[in-house]
Amino acid sequence: MSEELHWKTAITSVEPNKVRLRGYPIDKLMGKISFSQAIYLVLKGELPSPEIGQLLDAILVSSVDHGAGPPSVLAARTVASTGAELHAAIAAGVLAIARFHGGAIEEGMNLFLAVARRADEKKMKEEEAAREILAEMKGRGERASGFGHRVHTQDPRTARLFSLAEELNLAGRFVRIARLIEKELKESIGKPLPINVDGAIAALLCDLGIPAEIGNAFFIISRVPGLVAHIHEEKTRMRPMRKIHPADFEYDGPPAREI
Amino acid sequence: MSEELHWKTAITSVEPNKVRLRGYPIDKLMGKISFSQAIYLVLKGELPSPEIGQLLDAILVSSVDHGAGPPSVLAARTVASTGAELHAAIAAGVLAIARFHGGAIEEGMNLFLAVARRADEKKMKEEEAAREILAEMKGRGERASGFGHRVHTQDPRTARLFSLAEELNLAGRFVRIARLIEKELKESIGKPLPINVDGAIAALLCDLGIPAEIGNAFFIISRVPGLVAHIHEEKTRMRPMRKIHPADFEYDGPPAREI
Amino acid sequence: MSEELHWKTAITSVEPNKVRLRGYPIDKLMGKISFSQAIYLVLKGELPSPEIGQLLDAILVSSVDHGAGPPSVLAARTVASTGAELHAAIAAGVLAIARFHGGAIEEGMNLFLAVARRADEKKMKEEEAAREILAEMKGRGERASGFGHRVHTQDPRTARLFSLAEELNLAGRFVRIARLIEKELKESIGKPLPINVDGAIAALLCDLGIPAEIGNAFFIISRVPGLVAHIHEEKTRMRPMRKIHPADFEYDGPPAREI
Amino acid sequence: MSEELHWKTAITSVEPNKVRLRGYPIDKLMGKISFSQAIYLVLKGELPSPEIGQLLDAILVSSVDHGAGPPSVLAARTVASTGAELHAAIAAGVLAIARFHGGAIEEGMNLFLAVARRADEKKMKEEEAAREILAEMKGRGERASGFGHRVHTQDPRTARLFSLAEELNLAGRFVRIARLIEKELKESIGKPLPINVDGAIAALLCDLGIPAEIGNAFFIISRVPGLVAHIHEEKTRMRPMRKIHPADFEYDGPPAREI
């Protein structure tokens, strides 16, 4: 029985006093690479350059928290409020990161990859491929993920991600495609529908060669620390079993300050 | 009704085109601080020094993955294998990080904090406080969390974490207490029961002023990317619904290599 | 390796074309016993009498839903609202059934069992044991779980459960102990703190010989169908990502009617 | 703010001392209807006949447990083994009930509903509609959910469910369609691919008018008690953190016995 169940994994080897992550001794990585670089290493199998590490840092910083209103935070706080343990509240928050919350990253990546594939296969310009695909989506009543935002008309995080990617020389084909789509949308709709932070992350992850299926993982990895902050605040500052209003709250933390 | 449900949060403020994390504009943090520093900021409320950022990087790199055998990985792979979505498999993995798996960090922190408190309250030497508390634990049949390991007699990650903390001038009272306990345990048991990686992280988090209740959060935050790697491998490399042997697997990734 | 991992289970045997639950062919149970009886069989290992089946039916009916306000419902709806799948929303709801929500059953069972044990060990009257234990709890600042309710002063479900248990001849020692505690609480506090539905279920499960550690399971088993109803309503009737107010809702289902 | 968040729910009304489920006072339902009938009531909004209650009892009994091998059980036991609480282990088990495990009910329902719709729309015989749709599925490389089983060639639960449904006069159009598909599959493949228990449940739920989107809920509702039994056995009989072999286990419960 044992033999036929034997299986293989390419992630980590563990021997007494020796743990190797994708071949590298983990104790040698510690102090040498950042957590962001380790995330890339464990997911992609290769060590990223310091520049990629910096871009990933910016991506992961950008989504660490977005206030108390998103459903992942409300689900995590609701569970924490019942006296449940930390890991249960985190799990509930993660379960709320789904199609309509965080899901725009994966959907955006699929859109950008489709445009690139169409341009390659049909040997057409990327803008034509974008126009074609957007028209098809319109015909099916679908909207482009990663564009527009309920709150932010000019999300400062998008601009920062793109300028940083350019400084680091990491903005490539997919950032270009994202911008082509933004331009097409403006023309076809008649008003701007700017790339939002999810769309920017989607373009950058495509340029980094991350598969679309784990695009949302970056949002989840980034957001877990924010969820922990909310769970801890709920458990230490609030009354158990309070009714948690999803919008009627105000910020009373440190005043606005500069880094 | 609305009024009495009004509540306050000190984590993040969101206004149109402006997201401030603990008072800092998030777009200004991007490119300036690492993900590890942002984790500290969101959890503690203040920006850490670059040195604290480096120590946190090492802590978070140390636990990113530990092979395919831990229950968090097996739970995540089992759920992934049924065709469940990424977030469901991550949530299952997080739910397996509990008292006996990852829980040693919080328990270790509580032990170290108890020794410090006892020494302060009774104005006794820390080694005496440690001896007293270990004797009481022995009387209750409890063992000290954060010491000893089934696989590793000399966990290289512990040595690395401690040497790095000393280089960075961040090893303080709690690293000292952890070592005192290690010494006491060796004397009382008659054989070495070295500080393991959980114990080392526990001591360092105490020295960083992290509350014990969120000690395990650092393990969860660190491990989520590893879980994602396993889930993705399961979904792309394995047959759905396979029987996942919990021990009979081998590593076939990149060969041993140096950074 | 395989041999040392060999293990045993006493719940269900599966052979080709033959599934036996606790020894009984499952196809022979189908049509003969109710779901409630099957729940008892799988948990306790023996077939219950029809009377026990009826009492369990009443227990499980009593907790199937309690409106849209409890945190398990709000967590499940919040997750459902993000486009997550049914099982993810159910899991989030289950994670919200913790110490302060549903947890009163297990805690009540532990209290009733403690009173019985004290009376037996000290050969004292149950009312004296109850008085002693309540006084100790008061000294530790603990309140008795299973008594009093924020909304219902006279929960009709409690009366119904107890009268049914008496009709079926299933009310035993622990129902008596629950009533003794109710009497003690009234005397010591000076106003009634009646047994609530959790307390009534706790007493009845003790009388049925269910271990306290799985007391909350009956609440979870009972509530899952209610969660499914709320998730389905959220997905079919509401807009995705709406802000879910935790109290400002009204009932617009079928008007009050009699069975 | 409060006003625009006001919302409505048609499931349960709660007033002091009065809980009404779909309009019926819950205390009046207790002792009168079975848990299975309450499940139908909360999900469909109307009280089912006693016959529907009996058929639901049989459906829910049929899936309460299927041994220690399914991934939902292994995920739940893996989480329980780490010292996690009951609700966390249940949640992990529920997360493993996904496309390839339990998902055949929803997929089977969608298939049967598609055949009925095709027959109605094209005014064709149901066998022709079934043949057409199966051919289309074959063209897309899809297999029919609810037919065939790895272990059971003649699942005794299928036969029992169908004979009971006929006795109770509840087998209708969709049982007929399921059998037509079974016949078509046998002819086109050249060997029998019998309706399995998921397929039988799918057909019966269609005949009861349950929407396909909550088809899997019946599997989850049914399986939660079985998961609790496994979690309790794991916690009381096994060593924490043991390696849980997914296949090398044997049954040592009560010997084969008749009801």
Image: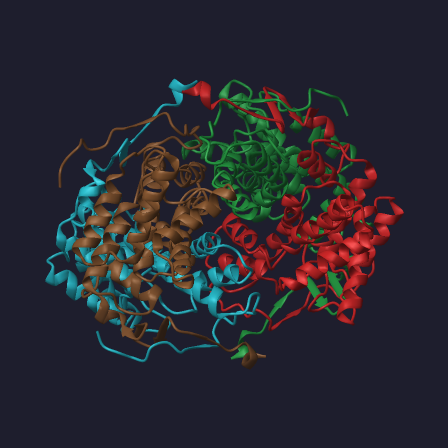
Chain colours: A brown, B cyan, C green, D red
Determine the image quadrant of residue B24: top left
Q: What residue do we see at 19% from left, 45% from top?
A: B29
Q: What residue do we see at 29% from left, 53% from top?
A: A175
In-front residue for pair A190/A36 = A190
Residue C220's place in the image compared with A221, above or below, is: above
In-front residue for pair B74/D140 = D140
Determine the image quadrant of residue D65: bottom right
Q: What residue do we see at 26% from left, 78% from top?
A: B257
Q: Horizontal and vertical percent for residue A17?
A: 30, 75
Q: Horizontal and vertical percent for residue C207?
A: 67, 41
Q: Horizontal and vertical percent for residue D242?
A: 49, 67
Residue D240's place in the image compared with D11, above or below, is: below
Determine the image quadrant of residue C160: top right
Residue A228 seen: no
Q: In this rendering, would D48 be left or right of C154?
A: right
Residue C258 seen: yes
In-front residue for pair B43/A34 = A34
Q: Horizontal and vertical percent for residue A211?
A: 39, 61
Residue A250's place in the image compared with C58, above or below, is: above
In-front residue for pair B126/A78 = A78
